Amino acid sequence: MAIRLNLQKTERILFCGSKWWGDPDMPENMQYPTIEAVDEDGEKMDYPLTFICQINCEDMAPFDKEGKLPHEGMLYFFGAIDEYLGYGSPVENAVGEWPKGHFVVKYAKSINFETFQSCILVDDEDQSLTEPELEITFSECEDGAEGHLMLACGDHDATGMVHLLRLVSDEKIGLLFNDGAALDVMIKESDLKYGNWKKAKAFLRQNQL
C-alpha cells in the first residue's frame, strides 16, 4: 500500500507541521539547498531549489505499516522544478535521472518548536518568493493510485530501493510535467537505514500515475 498526500487550504498555523509550498521550518544549523547556475549575464550564482514540502513524520507514521520511513522528526524535499511551475529558470531537467544536487532530501531527527525557524526566501524588494502553503494530510491508497504519493511501488522500481515521494502534474497547484510524466524520488534501503539522505535520487519518468 502507498500513502497519498492530500493538499488543502487551511487557516491553521502550519509551523513545524506537514505542509506543501510555503517556507520550510528548519533547525538553525540546516542550510537551504542551492545549486550552481549561470545567470543571463553569464555569471555564476547560487540558485535556490524550490521548497516542495516538509513531512512531519509523526503525521505520516500511522500509514507506514511496515516502518520503512522514520516515524519521528521532519523530512524536507527540495527540487529544481521552477520550469514545471511556469517560471523562467537557469536550470532545466529532462526525462531520466536528474543530476546530483538538482533534487535534495533533508531530514531532522527531532522537532524543536523553540529552535526551529522558517527559512523565508525574498526577492530584491523583500517580497516572498514562495507559493502559499497548503496543509498535507495522509491517507492509505493502492500503489497505482493517482496523486502525490509516498511508498508507491511499480515495475520500474529497482530492488532494494525505497520510494520516498512521487510528484505528478497537478493543475490546482500549478505543477505541470510534460506528457503525463511523474517525478519519483528514490533511495537505497541501506542509505535510508544509515541516514544517507544525500544519496536520494530523482527520476522524471514518462507515463506514470
Image (cartoon, rainbow, N blue to C red):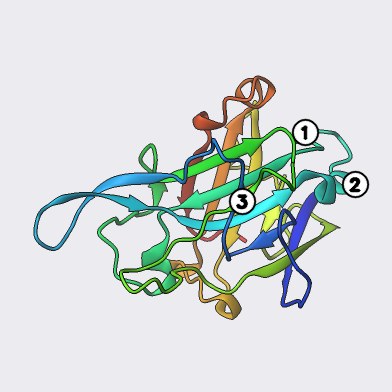
Query: Residue 161, position in %: x, y?
Result: 63, 31
Residue 70: x and y in percent read 76, 35
Residue 81 shows up from this direction: yes
Q: Residues within 10 Å of mark 1 (few under 14, many from 20)?
A: some
The residues bearing labels 1 and 3 have C-alpha atoms spaced at a distance of 28 Å
Q: Secondary structure at mark 1?
A: loop
**Mark 3 residue element:** strand
Asked which quadrant contains residue 11, the reply is bottom right
Residue placed furthest toward the left: 41
Q: Mark 3 highlights which residue? A: 117
Nearer the observer, disc 1 or disc 3?
A: 3
Q: Residue at x 79, y 72 (%)?
A: 12
Cα gap from disc 3 to disc 2, whole angstroms: 26 Å
Q: Among all residues in the image, which is located at the extreme front?
A: 114
Residue linked to disc 2 = 62
Instruction: State left or right for residue 110 relative to residue 33.
Output: right
Label number found at residue 68? 1
Q: Of the residues under marks 3 and 2, which one precedes in the sequence?
A: 2
Q: Is residue 56 above or below residue 72?
A: below
Sort mark 3 into few (<14), some (14-19) or many (20+) by Cα contacts within 10 Å.
Answer: some
**Percent of width and height locating residue 207:** 52, 61
